[in-house]
């Protein structure tokens, strides 16, 4: 198994502050998609990142290889929506994970 950092790049720097209703509906489907991947074990951590230049999304995933990580990204409803989002997929040569029991806080 390999690990990858996925950066979801929004269609414009002002997103999500000026998101349309249709974009927000697609974002709801996007969140549900990644929640399922987390429950199934391929997504380790997923969420929005806010910084002074704007917001973007991130996911750390485990996948067989880069092609499998790309398949995960391509199946995201926000990518399939055609609203102009894209993923940067970066390999992580190693990862340190907290013990599984630590997540029960």
Image (cartoon, rainbow, N blue to C red):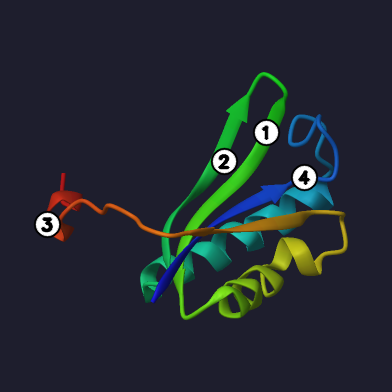
Q: Earlier in the sequence, mark 2 or mark 4?
A: 4
Q: Residues within 10 Å of mark 3 (few under 14, many from 20)?
A: few
Tell me what residue is drawn at x 81 percent, y 47 percent. 21
Q: Earlier in the sequence, mark 4 or mark 3?
A: 4
Furthest residue toward front? 93
Q: Position of residue 55 (x, y in %)?
A: 67, 33
Give the CA separation, mark 3 to mark 1: 31 Å
* Residue 26, image quadrant: bottom right
Give the CA separation, mark 2 to mark 4: 11 Å
Q: Earlier in the sequence, mark 4 or mark 1?
A: 4
User: Is disc 2 in contact with disc 1, using a CB cutoff of under 8 Å?
Assistant: yes
Residue under label 2, please give it: 48
The foreground one among 60 and 48 is: 60
User: Is disc 4 in contact with disc 1, using a CB cutoff of under 8 Å?
Assistant: yes
- Quick one: SS at disc 2? strand
The foreground one among 86 and 80 is: 86
Q: Position of residue 9 (x, y in %)?
A: 73, 47
User: Is disc 2 in contact with disc 3, using a CB cutoff of under 8 Å?
Assistant: no
Residue under label 4, please give it: 10
Q: Which mark is residue 101?
A: 3
- Quick one: SS at disc 3? helix
Asked if residue 47 lies left or right of residue 70, the reply is left
User: Is disc 3 in contact with disc 1, using a CB cutoff of under 8 Å?
Assistant: no
């Amino acid at each position: 198994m390999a690990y990858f950092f996925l950066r979801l790049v929004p269609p414009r720097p002002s997103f999500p502050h000026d998101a349309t209703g249709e974009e927000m509906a697609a974002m709801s489907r996007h969140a549900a998609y990644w929640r399922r991947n987390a429950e199934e074990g391929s997504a380790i951590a997923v969420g929005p990142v806010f910084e002074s230049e704007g917001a973007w999304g991130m996911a750390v995933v485990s996948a067989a290889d880069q092609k499998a990580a790309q398949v995960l990204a391509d199946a995201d409803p926000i990518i399939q929506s055609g609203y102009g989002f894209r993923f940067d997929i970066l390999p992580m040569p190693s990862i340190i994970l907290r013990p599984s029991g630590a997540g029960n806080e």
